[in-house]
Amino acid sequence: MSKGADLAQELGIECKQALYSSWGNFYGAITDFPCVLFDENGFVIVTSENDLQSFGIKVAKRTNVPHRIASLPTYQLLSAWRVSLPEELLKKLPHVAHIEGAAVTVTVNRYERDRTARSKCIAHYGCVCHACGIKLSDVYGTVAANCIHVHHVTPIASVKSEYELDPIRDLRPLCPNCHTIAHLRQDGTCQ
């Protein structure tokens, strides 16, 4: 087995081809999809030739990744896939009961959304995160096709009344992670 195939097997990534380069810039030709490209710190899953073109990767006798795979929006760190506690630590942890499922009544204000505005935002920007550039279907496959959050540039709760929304100016598509971070920021920005 090659180092790329070993890494794919270790991480449980199903693929037809796995290539490795410590620097992440040049590889042998990609012939089978899905393919995983590894460098010493992470990897990118390439599901089709269209992915290659969208990433700006040129394939001839060898694959040319101009700025290394770490520069690609779907790059994932190996360390994030290898997180686990050693067995001896797990045995020493005290047993703690975690109880869930109790019914609680909660009263909140819900601000109405216009679903057609959401559709127009996605039609204009596409299902690609405006902040990080990730397309969820590139990572998770067809199950995530057309899956994206839509963020209000000005938080709807801060307006405190009905207002006329411009789907292109006032909304941005964001992946769930970037959407969470946009709401954690003081200014609500997504970039």
Image (tube, rainbow, N blue to C red):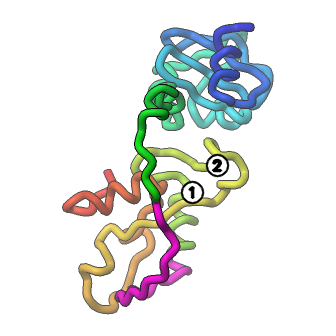
**Quick check: 86 left or right of 13?**
left
**Magenta stretch?**
98-117
Q: Position of residue 134 (x, y in %)?
A: 51, 45
Q: Label 1 crowding class (10 Å Cα cut-off): few <14, some 14-19, many 20+?
A: many
- What is the secondary structure assignment of the residue under circle 2? helix
Q: In percent of the image, x 42 and y 63: which residue is there?
A: 172
Quadrant housing residue 126:
bottom right
Any magenta on residue 156? no
Q: Mark 2: which amino acid?
A: Ser
Looking at numbered disc 1 in the image, what kind of residue is underneath it?
Answer: Cys
Which residue is rendered at x = 44% and y = 73% of the image?
167
**Residue tagged by mark 1?**
127
Residue 33 vs 96, above or below: the answer is above
Which residue lies at the image location 49% right of the left edge and 19% below the top edge? Answer: 68
Compared with 110, 118 (above or below) is above
Q: Which residue is mark 2?
A: 137
Between 72 and 183, the residue placed more toward the observer is 183
Position in image of residue 75 (x %, y %): 51, 31
